[in-house]
Image (cartoon, rainbow, N blue to C red):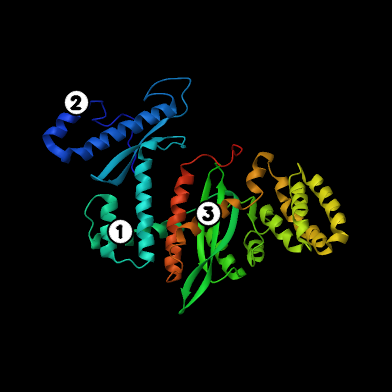
């Protein structure tokens, strides 16, 4: 990764629209990529100046940070590959919107390529489709090469170092996969988290035969081997096999059981349909209290209330609902984000929307590749998006 030593604008950044037009007239479309490069670079430079609230080398009490050179990035456009100079900020937290559309197109192309391969589309057909998407001629050999690069990119993303993660979310969903000649439901184990800086991150996925302890344990151990550390709270539903694996790999780490799933689980112990609304309201009242002491008081009253009307529900509430109280031990302004595993539920819904057209994956690898491509795309949006939680400094 190469950074320029100073923040001086590269040659050609000065605003000379008349000269650009004259050059375009003389050289034709050959000069268009260079014009795009200069104009987008200038737009990104202006964005950084506005972000910092100061121009290069300007002394100002209102400055929000410091420029830190440029990082080259090559993007494929309709006029060919263009290498842009992305302005950097020493304190982080800045990424120019001028390139966002290009990056979205780049990610969309990777996803389209992955989906087409999963569905068995030939390289010749993929080449024709990508040619229409990119506006340039693409050969079958180039498509094959792109597929290999996609595999390498996804593998690098799945095995990248992780670092400190304060809050860890775990969940699973199922996809139909052809295995040994028959169609089976394969478990997609997923992990996301909130890092020390307050940004969300998709940490990893694994395609397994089931949610048995051995699969969850292998998945969690792989996260730790990639450098995952500093976990203060684990948020998940009560998945089969996860509890034993969680206790073995993250011994002593507090666990918050998803309150949303607890409310749903309570409905299974209601003897009469007409009680559903009342029970749901009672469970919400317990969870919406300001502290654990009040929650336990309300829970005791609910258990006494249903002891005769629905004894199985009363017993279940007494044992299970306290597993949703762990969040009360964490900062109040964080609690809303830690009550449930809905963060991963929304990812699961997006995966379902994108994999619906596949219906049955030909093998586990194809399933892992497509879902990895989807999650990598979402993870990049999270990385450059807003803070998920305001964390304490240090």
At 30% across and 40% down in the image, what residue appears? Answer: 84
Image coordinates of residue 336 in percent, x first then y, are 65, 44
Q: Which residue is mark 3?
A: 347
Q: Quadrant of the N terminus?
A: top left
Residue 203 visible in this rendered orientation of the protein? yes
Question: CA gap, disc 1 to disc 3?
Answer: 26 Å
Query: Looking at the image, is mark 1 or mark 3 nearer the viewer?
Result: 3
Image coordinates of residue 35 in percent, x first then y, are 23, 35
252, 342: nearer the viewer: 342
Image coordinates of residue 46 in percent, x first then y, are 36, 28
Residue 1 visible in this rendered orientation of the protein? no
Describe the element under mark 3 as helix, strand or loop.
helix
Q: Quadrant of residue 137?
A: bottom left
Farthest-out residue, left = 26
Q: Is residue 116 left or right of residue 246?
A: left
Farthest-out residue, bottom = 181
Q: Earlier in the sequence, mark 2 or mark 3?
A: 2
Q: Is residue 244 left or right of residue 36?
A: right
Please say if 212 is above or below 246.
below
40, 105: nearer the viewer: 105
Please say if 61 is above or below 284.
above
Q: Which residue is mark 1?
A: 146
Q: Label 1: how many residues lie within 10 Å, few (<14), some (14-19) or many (20+)?
A: some
Q: Which residue is mark 2?
A: 18
Q: Label 3: how many residues lie within 10 Å, few (<14), some (14-19) or many (20+)?
A: some
């Amino acid at each position: 990764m190469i950074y320029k030593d100073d923040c001086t604008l590269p040659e050609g950044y000065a605003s000379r629209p008349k000269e650009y037009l004259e050059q375009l007239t003389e050289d034709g479309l050959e000069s268009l990529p260079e014009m795009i490069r200069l104009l987008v670079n200038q737009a990104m430079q202006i964005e950084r100046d506005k972000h910092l609230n100061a121009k290069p080398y300007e002394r100002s009490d209102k400055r929000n940070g410091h420029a830190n050179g440029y990082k080259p990035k090559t993007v494929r456009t309709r006029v060919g590959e263009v290498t842009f100079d992305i302005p950097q900020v020493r304190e982080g937290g800045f990424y120019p919107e001028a390139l966002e559309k290009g990056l979205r197109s780049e990610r969309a192309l990777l996803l389209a390529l992955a989906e087409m391969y999963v569905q068995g589309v030939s390289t010749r057909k993929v080449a024709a489709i990508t040619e229409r998407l990119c506006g340039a001629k693409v050969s079958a050999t180039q498509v094959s090469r792109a597929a290999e690069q996609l595999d390498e990119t996804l593998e690098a993303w799945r095995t990248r170092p992780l670092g400190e993660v304060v809050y860890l979310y775990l969940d699973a969903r199922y996809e139909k996969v052809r295995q040994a000649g028959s169609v089976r439901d394969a478990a997609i184990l997923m992990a996301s988290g909130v890092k020390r800086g307050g940004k969300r991150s998709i940490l990893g996925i694994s395609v397994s035969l089931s949610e048995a302890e051995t699969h969850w344990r292998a998945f969690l151990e792989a996260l730790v081997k990639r450098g995952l550390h500093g976990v203060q709270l684990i948020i998940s539903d009560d998945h089969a096999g996860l509890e034993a694996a969680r206790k073995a790999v993250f011994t002593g780490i507090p666990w918050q059981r998803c309150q949303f799933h607890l409310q749903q689980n309570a409905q299974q112990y209601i003897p009469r349909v007409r009680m559903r609304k009342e029970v749901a309201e009672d469970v919400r009242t317990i969870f919406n209290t300001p502290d654990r002491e009040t929650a336990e008081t309300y829970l005791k009253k609910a258990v006494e209330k249903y002891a005769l009307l629905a004894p199985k529900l009363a017993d279940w509430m007494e044992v299970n609902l306290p597993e949703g109280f762990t969040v009360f031990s964490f900062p109040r302004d964080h609690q809303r984000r830690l009550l449930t595993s809905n963060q991963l539920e929304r990812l699961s819904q997006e995966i379902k929307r994108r994999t619906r057209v596949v219906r049955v994956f030909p093998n586990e690898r194809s399933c892992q590749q497509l879902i990895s491509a989807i999650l990598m795309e979402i993870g990049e949006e999270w990385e450059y998006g807003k803070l998920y939680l305001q964390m304490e400094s240090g």
